[in-house]
Amino acid sequence: MSRAWDVGLGSLDEGTFLRCCELFLQHARSLDDGWSWGSLNGSDEGFLKKTVLVTGKINTEAPDGPCRPGENLDMLGEDVQVGLARADEALAFTCAVLAEPSAGRHPCERAGNAQDGGPDDAEGTPAPPGAAAVIRYEYHVLYSSSFQTPMLYFRASTLDGRSLSLEEIWDGVHSNYRQRLLHAPWDSITQQEHPLLGQPFFALHPCRTQEFMSPVLEAARNQNRSLNYIVSWLSTVGPVVGLHIPLSYATVSSEPSGPDPD
């Protein structure tokens, strides 16, 4: 099985990035998981993208006046409400896995028993400052030529179109991840311009992506096991900002069987 990444450095070239994205998209379409390929007219460059709705806390005083989160929640249909509940369950599962990591194994393959309910489920638990609201997250996965790794960009807004501040983004990071964020630069959330769209986005800095991906790639090589770099990387960094990858993605390989993403 051929591999176009450097196991020792934990990096990959742009061609491999595109092929891994292609197989990722093939599986996403089979699941109707909401991922698609975005590109600019007249450009060969592109990115994976997905938009999801989640519940979260926002400042009660927005720049344009006080928020009324109850109206946002009530305007959603039953199907969306069910989806939000499932997202909360996924967060609880991810936090349980993080509490007992399994070294050298793909994050999608780790076994863990999530406790019933999430951080806000218990009655009588004080809620953090702010109000509950529905938040729209837009995630983009691009290739970084500088770091030779994927990079996760995202932005978040309320249903009325107000963009969340960096402070609100940090407030939305689950407490189980906060200590890791303080001590792991590769998890640092920053604001910067989207390299293709030229619009303001948040991003997880990739300066140590190669460091944590190298042992993952080495373990796959030693076990002669197929591995998709995008799946392994995204299932590691995505949950930090609320992006969860279903377990079935662990079956996606790195060998494409069709044309590049379109």
Image: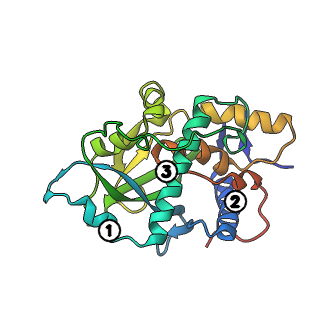
Q: Residues within 10 Å of mark 3 (few under 14, many from 20)?
A: some
- Of label 3 and label 1, which has the lower sequence position? 1
Q: Residues within 10 Å of mark 2 (few under 14, many from 20)?
A: many
Disc assigned to residue 88: 3
- Of label 3 and label 2, which has the lower sequence position? 2
* SS for callout 3: helix
Disc assigned to residue 74: 1
| x and y percentages locating residue 178 in the rendered image | 43, 31
Q: Quadrant of residue 99?
A: top right
* SS for callout 2: helix
Instruction: Using residue 124 as the reference point, say whether residue 248 is left or right of it.
Output: right
Residue wearing tag 2: 19
Colour convention: rainbow
Residue 260, compared with residue 97, is above or below; it is below
Can residue 161 be seen here? The reply is: no
Q: Is the residue under label 1 in contact with that under label 3 (CB below 8 Å)?
A: no
* SS for callout 1: helix
At 54% from the left and 41% from the top, the residue drawn is: 147
Q: Nearer the viewer, residue 140 or 53?
A: 53
